[in-house]
Amino acid sequence: MQRISGMGLGLIAGPVLVVTMGPVEGILVVNVLAFLNAAATTVTVREYVDWRKFALIGSVLVVGSVPAALLVREVSGSLLQALVGGLLLIALAVTTFGQKYIPHAEGPAPALVAGIAGGFMNTLAGIAGPAITVYAQASRWGQQSFAATLQPIFMVAGALSFLTKILSGAGSLTETNWLIWPVGILGMALGLWIGVRLSEKVSRPRARNIALVLASAGGVVALVRGVSGLL
């Protein structure tokens, strides 16, 4: 899905891992897998990457990542799970139904704001893509270049999110089942292999719609579980 539409791993795997592993450990695993997945995908789409926009957005991801890591450290697991689910659903709603209401954006300022928001959302919920999608819509960024440029951005975002949470004491993977890594890497490799072969056959709008449906379902589950834990 990520090879075809630019996004996918965080949107789909994030809610699943949050529900099965918890909001802190689950998103930490997503951060690591997102880094590896984006690195592999970058190799296949590097000729379409807009390196100038990557540098602009990637340079400020840490500004959003640090406060998000501190928030993860301080709030309860149920509240964090509800925040992850709610934030995901809001981001999906904005990028899906609010496209025509997004004003045109020019200059570096909107890109910097998108980078900060992406860093915050990626550290909290493992999803940098929706925040940057809003900027892409506002700046009329072409889909092919946008989808390709997201990959190195996801690499930086994943690394920063992981490091800020580990260094701040907001999370740890010391008790994570080691099987998650070979299973996750195998799944990503298989998905990338399939994505490369389907990228010319499956339309980007259709692939995006499938990803949005799956991500929305996961977001609802995470939100409901988080809210029920608070009651």
Image: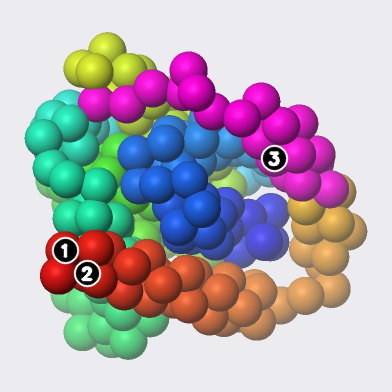
Give me the residue at 24% from left, 18% from top. Answer: 169
Q: Earlier in the sequence, mark 2 or mark 3?
A: 3
Which one is in front in this view, the residue at disc 1 or the one at disc 3? 1
Residue that carries the numbered disc 3 in the rendered image: 184
Q: Are marks 1 and 3 in contact (CB under 8 Å)?
A: no
Q: Position of residue 2 (x, y in %)?
A: 63, 55
Q: Is residue 226 above or below residue 44?
A: below
Q: Amino acid at mark 1?
A: Leu
Q: Is residue 181 above or below residue 211?
A: above
Q: Which numbered disc covers residue 230?
A: 1
Image quadrant containing the N terminus: bottom right
- Left or right of residue 44, residue 21 in this image: left
Q: Are marks 1 and 2 in contact (CB under 8 Å)?
A: yes
Q: Mark 1 to mark 3: distance in Å? A: 30 Å
Q: Is residue 136 above or below residue 73?
A: below
Q: Which numbered disc covers residue 114?
A: none
Say few, some or many: other residues with alpha carbon within 10 Å of mark 2 (under 14 / 14 to 19 / 20 or more).
some
- Give the farthest residue toward the top: 167
Tell me if I can see residue 34 in this picture.
yes
Give me the residue at 24% from left, 63% from top. Answer: 229
Which one is in front in this view, the residue at disc 2 or the one at disc 3? 2
Q: Amino acid at mark 2?
A: Val
Q: Amino acid at mark 3?
A: Gly
Tell me if I can see residue 40 in this picture.
no
Residue that carries the numbered disc 2 in the rendered image: 227
Q: Mark 1 to mark 2: distance in Å? A: 5 Å
Q: Position of residue 25 (x, y in %)?
A: 42, 36
| Magenta-tinted stretch | 170-190
Asked which quadrant contains residue 54, the reply is: top left
